[in-house]
Image (cartoon, grey):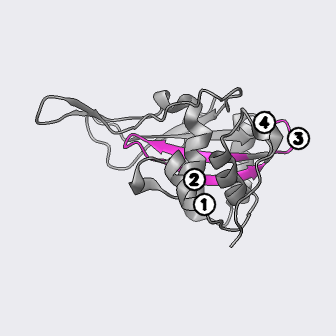
Amino acid sequence: MKETTGYPENAEGLFSPAEYRVLAHYLDGSPRYVGLAEDLAEILPDARYRSVESAVALVALERIQQRLPRWLVRNSQGDIVETRKQRPVSKNRKVLLKPVYLGSDEGFGAGPGMSWRVEYFATWIPLFDRFVITQSDDDGNDELIGVLDSLDGSGRQSPHHLLDQWRAEMREDEEAIARLDRIDDVE
């Protein structure tokens, strides 16, 4: 097993060392490394969601996490409990990623007065020159559902172009195409 993935100087202020190693492992296909479990624990404090895909989604969506779908409930003690846990933004972060809203889907099981909203975002990941496509639901789950290469290296593709590119890459995946067809409010 490889010890670690290096931390390049140009990643400082953009990603923490743990974030960079997890992104490199997923996006560049670097092999599993000894410190992966510790890196996932640093990025994802909630042990239920310690997957590489969840960590990549959380890094990509950090800047907008307070705007993502959530569900609130009052518990038996009268306290309001929120389904989405907020991760503090690093004080060393000099550059914030900018997720692009692709649209939303009124998930399955919605009833009168209830919404099960799912929102889709594309986030350009500098240094790796790729977009990650994520979906966020009101249970507080953020999932990585696709990766696209940046066409020009700038990360400046329009939401319509990103959806078209994703649709082309997912042409064999019927579930992904059905999900794309339900997205209703692309800007």
Mark 4 closeness class: few <14, some 14–19, many ≥20 residues within 10 Å? some
Disc 1 and disc 4: Cα gap in Å?
34 Å
| Residue type (three-letter) at the residue carrying disc 4 | Gln
Does dot 4 land on a helix, a strand or a loop?
loop
- Provide residue 17's location: percent of width, then percent of height: 67, 45
Question: At 62% from the left edge and 66% from the top edge, which residue is drawn?
Answer: 34
Residue position marked by numbered label 4 in the rendering: 157
Residue position marked by numbered label 1 in the rendering: 35
Picture quadrant of residue 131: top right
Q: Which mark is residue 39?
A: 2
Q: Residue furthest right?
A: 152
Circles 2 and 3 in contact, beta carbons < 8 Å: no
Circles 1 and 4 in contact, beta carbons < 8 Å: no
Say which label, 3 or 1, has the lower sequence index: 1
| Residue type (three-letter) at the residue carrying disc 2 | Asp
Does dot 2 land on a helix, a strand or a loop?
helix
Q: Residue furthest bottom?
A: 1
Say which label, 3 or 4, has the lower sequence index: 3
Picture quadrant of residue 5: bottom right
Give the camera-side residue of 53 and 111.
Answer: 53
Report the quarter where the C terminus lies. top right
48 left or right of 182?
left
Circles 1 and 2 in contact, beta carbons < 8 Å: yes
Does dot 3 land on a helix, a strand or a loop?
loop
> Which label sits in the foreground, 2 or 4?
2
Disc 3 and disc 1: Cα gap in Å?
33 Å
Does dot 1 land on a helix, a strand or a loop?
loop
Residue 178 in view here: no
Q: Which residues are magenta?
A: 131-157
Residue position marked by numbered label 3 in the rendering: 152
| Residue type (three-letter) at the residue carrying disc 1 | Gly
